Image (spheres, helix red, strand yellow):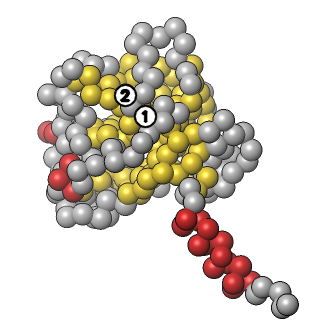
Amino acid sequence: MRPLSSIVIVRVVLLVCLLIPIVCNAGQILLDTDTFGGANGDALSTYSANWPRLSSPDLGLITIQTTPGFGQANPDNGLSAHRRTGQTWTDNQWGEAIIGSPVNGIFGIMVRSADEPGNGVAYLGGYFPTTGDTIYKIVRLNSDTSLAYLVVDPGSHTAASDDIVNFEAVGTVLRLRVTRSAAPLADFTYDTVGDTPIYTTGDPGLFEWHTTGPIRAGGTWRAGSVTPDTRARRTLMGVGQ
């Protein structure tokens, strides 16, 4: 029997990657992805029924911007959030997206987002200005749409266009990882034990608001489940840890 050629091996590997869940950062399994290739200006909930707006009378709509991509057509829309449905999400989950340009306002990956009676709640990982900065933070979205700042990146890294923001929730621990130019930039955690309230289940999604518009806040979103696997893994959008 002749040995398999390198071309055949590559084709087999690609086929396997298409047929089974893709493992990303340590323990992360890819279940869903979106590049936002809809019509400019369409709300995500118009672009896809699997992007409903997070329930709240005070939250606006994220729209398709500079397709493919997402953002805001008008900063007057205010804080905007959409959760992703259509999958059976586990409580241990993650989400990831690439930051667009320019960097201003608010940009967050949501995990465990849920529609409370009349309002939405979630954990957020991204950049949120407290004193005009764009330092990475982990934040809780409360049911009154206020933001509780849980932890600031100990390295004080500020956001930049094309950064890859990866945010996960495993048990009571939230973890934010940022990759820049294919190299790890930030990696920090927050334990929600003792917090009130604590969110234990829900959907991943997106949360953003920008001070100018129209703006392409980001693109290429993906999400999935997390297994208790600590082995090093590869990632499709950055460097595995």
Label 2 packing within 10 angstroms: few (<14), some (14-19), many (20+): many
Please provide percent x and percent y for residue 199: 42, 21
Report which quarter residue 47 is drawn in: bottom left
Q: Is residue 200 left or right of residue 2?
A: left
Question: Tag count in the figure?
Answer: 2
| Contact? badges 2 and 1 (CB < 8 Å) | yes
Q: Earlier in the sequence, mark 2 or mark 1?
A: 1
Q: Quick one: SS at disc 1?
A: strand
* Residue in front for this viewpoint, 178 or 122: 122
Residue drawn at point x = 27 percent, y = 38 percent: 81
Q: Is residue 4 left or right of residue 217?
A: right
Q: Is residue 170 left or right of residue 82?
A: right
Q: Which residue does the numbered mark 2 point to in the structure image?
A: 122
Q: Is residue 193 left or right of residue 36?
A: right
Residue type of the residue flagged with mark 1: Val
Q: Would you say residue 32 is visible in this rendering? A: yes
Above or below: residue 30 compared with residue 192 = below
| Distance CA(mark 2)–CA(mark 1) | 6 Å
Question: Looking at this rendering, what residue extends furthest in the right direction?
Answer: 1
Please provide percent x and percent y for residue 62: 24, 46
Residue 111's mark?
1
Above or below: residue 162 compared with residue 187 = below
Q: Quick one: SS at disc 2?
A: strand
Residue drawn at point x = 54 percent, y = 13 percent: 193
Q: Would you say residue 131 is visible in this rendering? A: no
